[in-house]
Image (cartoon, rainbow, N blue to C red):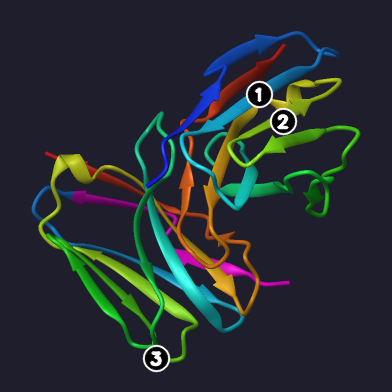
């Protein structure tokens, strides 16, 4: 079945440093979604990428979808303590309506 | 985006008992899902709740253990039956349309003693 690998598992940065998490799918995806889960919270939707090579920005966050639609990344510029949490990617394959989640990247930020 | 509520928000239960979790959405949605998130882990899909018919379960999850109801397009329940400590997890309801965004409820934090 479809697998979505996400790295790194953990990332600790100093406030102001950049951060990137990567997702790789075993199969071509129809779309990919990114979520943020704060400690003790629930996954909150950030963005959905659909098109090959798509790049979307939300303030300091940049999301990319690979040309082959098998990988994606989330980059945060100049991290802040409010960025702390676990970032999950979740991919959909073909006509499948179900999401397959990566294991997530836990980001901690040292002030 | 849909507003999703879950009840209870948390519970502590004894081994061998059952707990029913409710999920209510403020608008009609096509798809409703139930996920489990064990401590420090990712999200695992338990089943898709189908309106008016039996839920579709993922590998490793069975109806006898996790019976699901979906009487209409805005409400669903998940029961965790005959609980054991291994069932201690966060249970999350999620809603969305077929190829579109999925939104998550606040979750139910379950501890089984």
Magenta-colored span: A1-13
Q: Chain of mark 3?
A: A
Which residue is rendered at x = 53% and y = 44% of the image? B28
Q: Which residue is mark 2?
A: B78
Do marks 2 and 1 share a subunit? yes
**Residue B39 relative to residue A66: left or right:** right
Q: In which image quadrant can residue A32 be found?
A: bottom left
Mark 2 or mark 1: whose residue is earlier in sequence:
1
Asked if residue A3 is among those painted magenta in the image, a careful observer would answer yes
Q: Chain of mark 1?
A: B
Which residue is rendered at x = 63% and y = 70% of the image? A3
Q: Which mark is residue A67?
A: 3
Q: Nearer the viewer, mark 2 or mark 3?
A: 2
Point out residue B67 in the picture as x, y percentages from the top left corner.
Answer: 82, 33
Q: Are marks 2 and 1 in contact (CB under 8 Å)?
A: yes
Q: Which mark is residue B21?
A: 1
Do marks 2 and 3 share a subunit? no
């Amino acid at each position: 079945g479809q697998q979505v690998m996400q790295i790194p598992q953990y990332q600790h940065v100093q406030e102001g440093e950049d951060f990137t998490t990567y997702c790789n799918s075993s199969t071509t995806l129809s779309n990919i979604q990114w979520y943020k889960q704060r400690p003790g919270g629930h996954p909150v939707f950030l963005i959905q990428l659909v098109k090959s090579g798509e790049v979307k920005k939300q303030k300091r966050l940049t999301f990319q979808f690979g040309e082959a639609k098998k990988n994606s990344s989330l980059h945060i510029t100049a991290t802040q303590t409010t960025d702390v949490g676990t970032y999950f990617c979740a991919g959909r394959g073909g006509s499948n309506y179900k999401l397959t989640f990566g294991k997530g990247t836990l980001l901690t930020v040292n002030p | 985006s849909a507003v999703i509520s879950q009840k209870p928000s948390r519970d502590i239960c004894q081994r061998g008992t059952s707990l029913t979790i409710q999920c209510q959405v403020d608008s009609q949605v096509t798809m409703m899902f139930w996920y489990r998130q064990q401590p420090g882990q990712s999200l695992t899909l338990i089943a898709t709740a189908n309106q008016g018919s039996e839920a579709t379960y993922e590998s490793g999850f069975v109806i006898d253990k996790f019976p699901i109801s979906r009487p209409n397009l805005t409400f669903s329940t998940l029961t965790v039956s005959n609980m054991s400590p291994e069932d201690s997890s966060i249970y999350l309801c999620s809603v969305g349309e077929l190829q579109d965004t999925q939104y998550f409820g606040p979750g139910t934090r379950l501890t089984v003693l």
